[in-house]
Structures are given as C-alpha cells and as structure tokens.
Image (cartoon, rainbow, N blue to C red):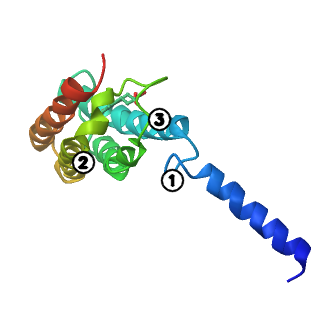
C-alpha cells in the first residue's frame, strides 16, 4: 500500500471511531431517539387500528386486522435498541430513570413484544382479537405508566 492510501485509510477509520461513542448502532442520542420514536409510531398506529375494531369504532374486518397485526408484530422488537445512554433529554418523553433500570425496562419491552407477536394469530376473529388486545394494552400501559412522561 502506498503511504497516501495508508493515511486515507487511517483517516477513514478515525472518522468511524468519532461517530461511534454514543453506541455502536447510532451516530448520536438524537438518532437513537428518532429511531425508537419512529418504530413506536408504526407499532402504535397499527395497534390503534386493531383497537378501533375491538372498540367497535371501525367494523371488524379479519383481513385488515391481520394486516395491521403483522405490521405491529414485525416492528414490536425494534424500538428497544434505541434506548441508549444519554438519550433521556431533549425531544423525548422517555424518563431518565430508564437508564438506571434497564433490566426491568427490557423485561417490560420483551413482555409487550411477546404479546404483540401473538396478535396475527388472534386477529382472525373478533373474540380472540379482543382477548389478545387486552393483554397487549396492559403490557403497553405498565411501561408507559412507569417510564414515559405524559
Ligand atoms: C418497555 C417500555 C414500553 C413499552 C412496553 C411500550 N412503550 Fe410505548 N413508549 C415508551 C417510551 C419510553 C416512550 C417515549 C419514547 C420517546 O419519546 O423517546 C413511548 C412512546 C410511545 C409512542 C409515541 C411515539 C412517538 O414519540 O411519537 C407510542 C405510539 C407508543 N409508545 C406505543 C406503544 C404501544 C402500542 C405499546 C404496546 C404494544 C408500547 N408503546 C409499549 C415505552 C414503552
């Protein structure tokens, strides 16, 4: 390798290193906040569509329910990696004490994701959807009550 390309390889490596401190996955805390909020928005919108059917605000439609359930399940495991160190101030409703309670927070996240995972199988009829939405709603609420600002 010529000296010039060695130098440019080192500069490149250094610039990646500079981008790394927030975590291996995100350039900075703002990027992590945006990532988790985006995933939560997609999950929430689809759980909301199911909620509207369960509450009778929208007529139950098995095909549409299953489509929403599949999208919710596809992203249910996504938001949590965005809860990184130093991402609990600024444009976020996440409470700062998540950082000190990561084990419990992740347990609540796993529980909610596991309940959302069961939605596609339950969405074929209104009774099973109602039952599973009860479990999903409780799992979301447990964490929001403790770790999300209103
Ligand atoms: C382990 C904790 C936890 C669980 C479980 C959880 N949430 Fe949240 N949720 C949060 C936190 C914390 C925020 C605030 C995130 C932020 O602002 O950075 C949030 C924010 C949201 C938002 C707003 C996103 C935005 O900023 O626009 C929606 C929608 C949402 N959650 C839906 C849900 C649904 C639906 C469930 C259940 C399937 C759920 N959440 C389960 C912790 C949780």
Query: Which residue is under mark 1?
Result: 25
Residue 47, given in percent of the width and then of the height, sits at 29, 35
Judge whether 34 appears above or below 119 on screen: above
The residue under the point 63% across, 57% down is: 17
Quarter of the image containing the C terminus? top left
- Describe the element under mark 3 as helix, strand or loop: helix
Query: Which residue is under mark 2?
Result: 113
* Residue that sits furthest to the top in the current view: 150
73 left or right of 91? left
Q: To which quarter of the image does residue 99 belong?
A: top left
| Of the pair 98 and 67, the residue shown nearer to us | 98
The crowd level at tag 1 (other Cα within 10 Å; few <14, some 14-19, many 20+) is: some
| Of the pair 63 and 104, the residue shown nearer to us | 104
Residue 128, given in percent of the width and then of the height, sits at 10, 44
The residue under the point 31% across, 26% down is: 95
Mark 3 within 8 Å of ligand 1, using the beta carbon: yes
């Amino acid at each position: 390798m010529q000296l010039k390309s060695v130098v440019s390889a080192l500069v490149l490596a250094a610039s990646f290193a500079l981008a790394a401190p927030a975590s291996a996955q995100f350039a900075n805390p703002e990027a992590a906040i945006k990532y988790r909020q985006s995933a939560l928005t997609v999950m929430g919108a689809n759980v909301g569509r199911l909620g509207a059917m369960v509450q009778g605000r929208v007529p139950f439609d098995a095909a549409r329910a299953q489509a929403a359930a599949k999208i919710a399940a596809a992203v249910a495991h996504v938001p949590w990696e965005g809860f990184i160190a130093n991402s609990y101030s600024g444009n976020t409703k996440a409470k700062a004490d998540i950082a000190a309670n990561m084990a419990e927070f992740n347990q609540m996240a796993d529980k909610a994701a596991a309940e959302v995972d069961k939605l596609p199988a339950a969405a074929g009829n209104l009774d099973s959807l109602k039952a599973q939405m009860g479990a999903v709603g409780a799992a979301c609420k447990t964490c929001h009550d403790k770790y999300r600002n209103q």
